[in-house]
Structures are given as C-alpha cells and as structure tokens.
Image (cartoon, helix red, strand yellow):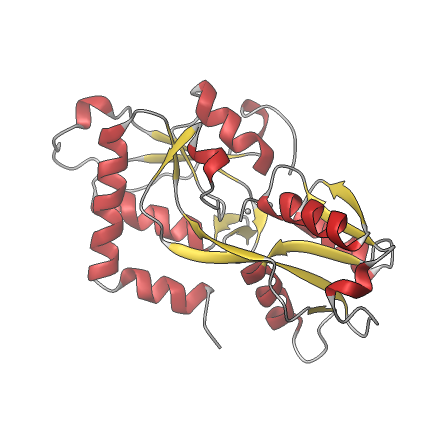
Amino acid sequence: MNTMKTMLGSVAAATLVLALSACGSSAPGDEDISQPLKIGVINNFPPFEYVEDGELTGFDVELVNAILDEEDLEGEWVVMGFDGLIPALQSGQIDLAVSDISVNEERKAVVDFSDPYYNDGQAIAVKAGSDIESFDDLAGKTIVSTQGTSGNVAAQKVAEEYGATVQTLASSDALYLAVTSGQADALVIDTSAIQYRIATDGETPSIQMLDEPIESAPTAIAIPRGNEALVERLNSGLKKIQENGTYDELRAKYLPED
C-alpha cells in the first residue's frame, strides 16, 4: 500500500483465479518464466484492487492484465493479505505482486521491482467535521493503520513526533470504520485511496484529509529477486501500454486528477 493496504492466511486458502488471455509466440527469456504467473494481490483497496459484481478489478488489476496481454503471458490471481505479499514472493509462492506497492529501500533489499507506474503518498484522514485540523492536533489521539504497509510505518513516525498512539488493523475497510464510528481519531493510508473514498462518498463525505501529506513514493510491480527475464518483460509491456494509450485510459478511469 506506499509502503502499505490485511488478511492473514495461507495463499492456498485465498486464491482467486482469473484467466488472462495469452499463449502467443515465445520471446527471448521465456524459458526463465514459468506460466501461468501467480500474481499476488489484495482485494479490498479501491481504486487499485477490489471486487465488483464478483469480479476482481481495479487500476492495478487492469494494468497487469494489459501488460501480460501485450507480452503474451498468462496469469493467475492469488488473493491474500498485504503483509503476506513480500514473504510470498521470497518463498516462491507467487511470481509477482501488485497492490499499490511503494518502492522503498527495505523492500528493494529483498525483492526486485519493475519500472514505476505511479507515484503515491501517505496522508492522514479524520472523520468529517473533526476538530483535528493539523498534525499538532494529533497529540493524545489514536491513529489506525494496516500491518505491513507504508502507511503503518508513516503512522508510527507521526505518532512518535506528535504524541499519538497507533493501533494496527487488518484492512483498509476497518480503518475507515474505526474513524467514522469514533473508535479512532485518524487513519493513515495512501493519498489516492483517501481521495477515492471522498469522491465515492458523494456530496456528504464521511472523512476529510489533512492538507499536509506525510510522504510520497513510486509504485511498482514486485518480483522475486533475480528473475531478470520477467522484469524485462514486465517493463516491456508497461512501456507498450504507455505508448499505445492504454495506460492513460486506465489512469483516467480509476485515478482521475480532478
């Protein structure tokens, strides 16, 4: 999630398979790419990945589908908790992972990344109408975040600096519920996720975002260390969809600037 969005459990217990069109002619390096590629993803972090009408969708999902289609690769989606994605890559249970995964030095030490495809940040949201208007107002307050995310790291830093307390919850949905119900005073999550929540709330948003962002970082596809052939193919597919307009269409659909 920016270094973030989590349901613990085995990969086998939470697998959602979506067939991706593929199986074209082979390309250099295909012998190093085992197919179908198992793609780790969470399913509760709109607009990046979520379930709609029983189908997994979102910006990350359509982006990876488009990349694999351009590269004639097959994929199989594996739904899991965010904090399980990096360990699953390290253990070889999945071949790549997406879920608005921020690129940072800690993660780069254990996994490889594709070229960045988005830049996101961490921000603080509070209940609409809250008297919390700045970071200074967080003194003595409770901040919620999700385990294993960049948001959790950012929340800890903010809490230490401004005298707040951090509680870790299982999912982004739980964060919003905690804040809107009054069980917590603020939440830390990706800026784009807060903006999406406010936009989809309509005329009466349930939350509001503090103007001052915490941090920002590039987002990329995570891959196990050493699979240079797969990194090359993913970067190639990303470049193709950026050049043919597909990327811009997905940005406009899921992450409009206005």
Q: Residue at x 54, y 23 (%)?
A: 12
Eyeballing the image, is 60 above or below 88? below
Q: Position of residue 74 (x, y in %)?
A: 29, 35
Q: Position of residue 155 (x, y in %)?
A: 69, 49
Q: Position of residue 27 (x, y in %)?
A: 12, 33
The answer to whether any part of residue 216 appears in the image is: yes
Eyeballing the image, is 69 above or below 248? above
Task: State the residue in front, 108 or 203.
Answer: 108
Q: Residue at x 34, y 35 (%)?
A: 75
Task: State the residue in front, 212 or 170.
Answer: 212
Please, which residue is most extreme toward the top here? 91
Eyeballing the image, is 239 above or below 13? below
User: Would residue 122 be found to the left or right of residue 143 on screen?
Assistant: left
Task: State the residue in front, 107 or 33.
Answer: 107
User: Would residue 141 be found to the left or right of residue 46 on screen?
Assistant: right
Q: Residue at x 52, y 32 (%)?
A: 85
The answer to whether any part of residue 73 appears in the image is: no
User: Would residue 121 be found to the left or right of residue 224 on screen?
Assistant: right
Q: Residue at x 18, y 27 (%)?
A: 30
